[in-house]
Amino acid sequence: MKRVILWLFVMSLMVSVQAQTNPANIKVDDLTDAQIEQYVKRAELMGYSESQLDGFARAQGVSAVEAQKLKDRLQKIKRNKQQPKNLDARQPAGNTTTGRQVNGAAQQDSVKNKKLPQDSLEIDENKLKVFGSDLFKNSEITFEPNLRMATPSSYIIGPDDEILLDISGDNEASYKLPVSPDGNITVEYVGKIAVSGLSVSAAKNKIQSRLSSTYPAIRSGNTHVDVNIGNIRSIRITLTGAVTKPGTYTLPSLATVFNALYASGGPGENGTYRQIQVIRNNQVVTTIDLYDFLANGIQRGNIRLQDQDIIHIPVYGSRVQFEGEVKRPAIFETVSGESLLDLVKYAGGFSEDAYTAKIKVLQKTDKERSVKDIYADQFADYSPKAGDQFIVEPILERFANRISILGAVFRPGLYGMEPGMTLKQLIEQADGVREDAFLERGIINRLRADNTAELINFNVREVLAGTVADIPLKREDKVEIASIFDLRDEYKFTVQGEVRLPGDFPFASNATLGDLIQKAGGLNEAAKNARIEIARRLKNRDVSDPSSSQTIQVDIKDGIVSDLNVELQPYDVITVLGDAGFRTQRQVKIEGEVLFPGIYTISREDERISDIIKRAGGLTSYAYTEGASLKRTGVSKLKAEEKKEKERLKKEMAKDSVEEVESEDEFDKETTAVNANAKNSALAKVSQQQGASSTEIEPSDLVGIELNKILINPHQRGDLLVLDGDIITVPKELETVKVMGEVLNPNNVVYVKGKSLKYYVNQAGGFTDNALKKRVFVQYANGAVKGKDGAYPEVKPGAEIVVPKRAPREKMNVQAWVGLGTGIASLAAIIVSLLRN
């Protein structure tokens, strides 16, 4: 019932949306943003992109006016979604906390008061910064005065400065003399000297002149006078106008204008960067243009400040916006006399992908906006106007003269098309066709004027010979000349059997049997007296003929092939058979409680376990015959190869299942979620299978033998023939029993004669809840296995008790229970009907 109600609600909602977006009476102004986005999705489902939205609307019967409104609304929705990111991008890096708060608040206010442009050509100003806005807000750039440098000789001395006076030569004396508020210093034996308002060099001359009356050696040069500045005074500077943090600042007397601007955070949002004024005694003593420093690194007008100086930052006069393919897009301030060429220099010049033939400018008139193209020869003459928005467009992603040639030519690749260039000329530029070129047919892939594809075929041989008319080429032509090897299966030979290097070999004309045997490294010793079979494909086989291939036999005697000159054909399979009488030495290993353990070579084809025991000197007195075992390493190798192949198949299945899910069409969000769940399920299933396989009990390569019976009745049943790689182990009597699998504490338990299997399980903590008790089995030390047959099997020394795990039971869902109940009810109805009848 809930699903039915939910379905009805969704259907009613879709009907209402469709009714509101009916093309016959659509009003874009009455639609919400969600309905606009839903309309766009419908267009995308029918193969229309966002740029083709107006065409889709017109095709649905929407008027041209409403179609344009629809497109403008979509652009506005996209800009509104991007607006928070743009605001974050404008936050200056490395500013002080106060500066960030002030600047951020100003930006938010400007965004609130600014209407977003409706014209698709307009640029969102929030994306760009004012050129130089982060100069004095970057903590990595410190405009602070260097107080450790030598005091300049032009420095003007004032109250609170400290003068260092050093007298050396015939007379020696040193003084630290503070400048008093009235501008004087007091020198011992000389008196007061007025130095306020004097430069360092002027003060030195005056002090030296006054000291000469006290120290006559100064006139003769035997005594020298040095004057330096120690501690410098502080000055108070006032910043007014459009400053980030206006006010009065106390700075060292060595501070410059840039130091003061840095202390105040520089020009504010509306402050000028081109005409910063320094006012001293109610007169403008200098005007600073920060663009000299920003663009060229020149600090023109950066004078040293004096006490009570005023730095005034007026509001900007004219700003323009520069965006697109320039190295430094920003909002720039312009002054009278500057041209567009100057702005290009401020913007760092064009980028590598810029279309430099012209710049598009969006101008503001008294009534409306206008668009104008300024060509390269007009850059130096165009004077930017306030509000201009300059856009440097990128070059087109296309080639004016590109053609290409691929396939069986010596130099395939891209080429530049010259006027009047033909197909033959292009092939000659590619150094001609290769020897394996298919000369009967080539293809030219050409784009028509409407960008639809067209194929033009030609005969390569006739074009090169000039017997047919040459074909003029056009821009974006792609010439393909195939190789004969691309048009057929790859020819090859296969060599297998008793050769040193079996495998596949490439086809070569006139190849013989001797050539291929030599390429395969020659014959093995096992083929010394054998034969070779050459299996050849049948051509034009009669369907009534049961033969599937042609076989050619060649004999080998004493390592000499009777006919090495048999000419081979493509796809021949050469099999070098072995000699039935050839045998390599085969060995078995016997270890443990025998007199002479070691490796023994099998001397007879019918040699058995008892024979090997006898050759090893028999058993020692400590031998435990019931625990003796035979290990077949050849079986383990085969099992290892089978396991490796299974793992490979599992990985391929997992890869195929995941790729199948990933290749599904992600049409909408719901489909994407389904695909993701399916992919996760596939991966989980594969990992579950792999996890299950990792917990499976590995099959044993031990062969259960009864050595005591073998030694009593040799060469009888159970006395197996030994094979190459066999390992016979005769242990000492074992005193433990291993318990593993689904028990609480798998471990080794001390063997107690006469105890049952349950005793050893209890010693290991007992069964777990997942134990499959009915399938408990015992593997004895000799490799023999015995399961539960009514009663638990007997336990012997060295045995392993294995408790398998019960298979997991799947929980029945509601549908399963309903199906089960339906089946039971149907069965009951059938039984009742039969009983009544």
Image: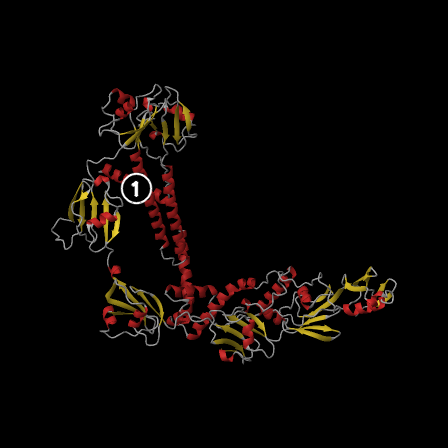
* Residue 819 or residue 378, whichever sits in front: 378
Q: Residue at x 51, y 76 (%)?
A: 361
Q: Is residue 787 visible?
A: no
The x and y percentages for residue 250 are: 73, 64
Of residue 247 and residue 159, the one placed in the foreground of this image is: 159
Q: Amino acid at mark 1?
A: Gly
Which residue shows up at 56% across the image and 75% down it? Answer: 342
x, y (%) of residue 5? 41, 54
Where residue 428 sits, quadrant-wise, is bottom left
Tag 1 residue: 823
> What residue do we see at 21% from left, 47% from top?
574
Residue 495's place in the image compared with 164, above or below, is: above
Residue 618 placement: quadrant: top left
Q: Quadrant of residue 101?
A: bottom right
> Residue 84: image x %, image y %?
54, 62
Callout 1: few (<14), some (14-19), or many (20+) C-alpha neighbours within 10 Å? few
State the residue in front, 486 or 696: 486
Give percent across and percent down for residue 754: 36, 19
- Quadrant assignment for the C terminus: top left
Q: Visible in this render: residue 335?
A: yes
Indicate the secondary structure of the residue bearing disc 1.
Answer: helix
